[in-house]
Image (cartoon, rainbow, N blue to C red):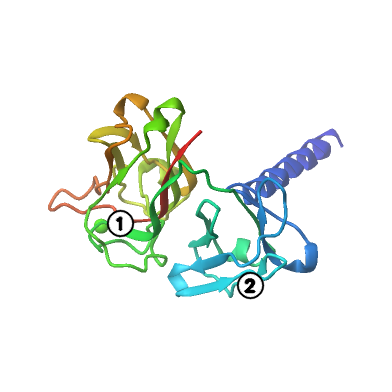
Amino acid sequence: MKNLFIILGFIFFLTVTADAATVSGGISKMDMNNANQIVDAVTNAPVGNAKVSLPKYNYSTYTDSYGTFSIGKVLGPTIMSVEKEGYRPFSLTINDTIAARPLVVGITKSNISDVVIASDVFHLGDDNYSDASSGAGTFRLRSSGPYFRKTFKLGAEVKNGSNYLVIGSIIGVDTLMARSMGQNKIVNSYASPPEIFFNGAKIAEIQLNGDNQKIKIPNNLIRAGQQNEVTIKAGRNLMQTAYVDYDDIEIANLSIISE
Ligand SMILES: [Ca+2]
């Protein structure tokens, strides 16, 4: 009997963990009218006329005055992005399981110091990738090459705060860590992580796929009131030595926020 309680306890624990996983990335579930809804993350008020897009399906729609919207059937991991004037661009990676249930997504008002570097989805790599990759099936765009580079101006005041590069969503990262976390089904190889550079200095490596990854930008690298540059370099397949095989990835929404 005692063993049965232990087993039941273990099952309960697993259930809680599985539920917790579905509410990560700013999503929570609600039964209200069984509808998907966009709300203000602070006030919980519905956000109407927000644009919701699934780039993979070439699909976009706008929320109604109750903030509700519908999306069709989704297969595999898919980036969903939300745009609304006055709010930070938001994206999250959904799949068939998540899309089958009502989604409530909280979005956050933008600050005057926010800098949107890219509000769309872009593909880095060489368009040569395995069906088992954590992004395969989701990739829609042709690769723009192994690098992304963008120059933008930052205000003079940003050095007063903490500054972060925020990656809205990233899919297709096939590092050893991504593989060990079950993010892809590749058996025989793995890739080096994509590298992030700020004004030429490496500030991060991206080991995992996911939403809203925040990377701290050291203030000493920032040229306040001047042009600054972000570079993202795709990783490489470390098991392919005959030629360079970049790890194909897609990124949605790139911005800099100051807090
Ligand atoms: Ca490749």
Q: Is residue 176 above or below residue 133?
A: above
Ligand 1: does it lie within 8 Å of the C-beta at label 1? yes
> What type is the residue that disc 2 sits on?
Ser
Image position of 225 with respect to 111: above or below: above
Residue assigned mark 1: 248
Q: Is residue 204 left or right of residue 240?
A: right
**Residue that appears at 58% across and 48% down:** 109
From the viewer's perspective, is the residue at label 2 or at label 1 nearer?
A: 2
Looking at the rendered structure, the secondary structure element under dot 1 is: loop
Quarter holding residue 158: top left
Q: Nearer the viewer, residue 85 or 201?
A: 85
- Asked where in the image residue 39 lies, by quadrant, the reply is bottom right
Res. 90 mark: none
> Which secondary structure, mark 2?
loop
Q: Where residue 127 sits: x, y (%)?
A: 25, 64
Residue 64 spot, x, y in % from top left: 67, 71
Name which residue type carries label 1. Asp
Image quarter for ligand 1? bottom left
- Give the side of residue 258 with respect to residue 205, left or right: right
At x 70% / y 68%, what residue is drawn?
Answer: 65
| Residue for badge 2 | 70
Left or right, 199 with reference to 216: left
- Give the image quarter of residue 20: top right
For the point 74% across and 44% down, the residue is 11
In depth, the one of 255 and 204 nearer the eye is 255
* Pointers 2 and 1 in contact (C-beta within 8 Å): no
Q: Position of residue 35 (x, y in %)?
A: 72, 67
Which quadrant, please, contains the N terminus? Answer: top right
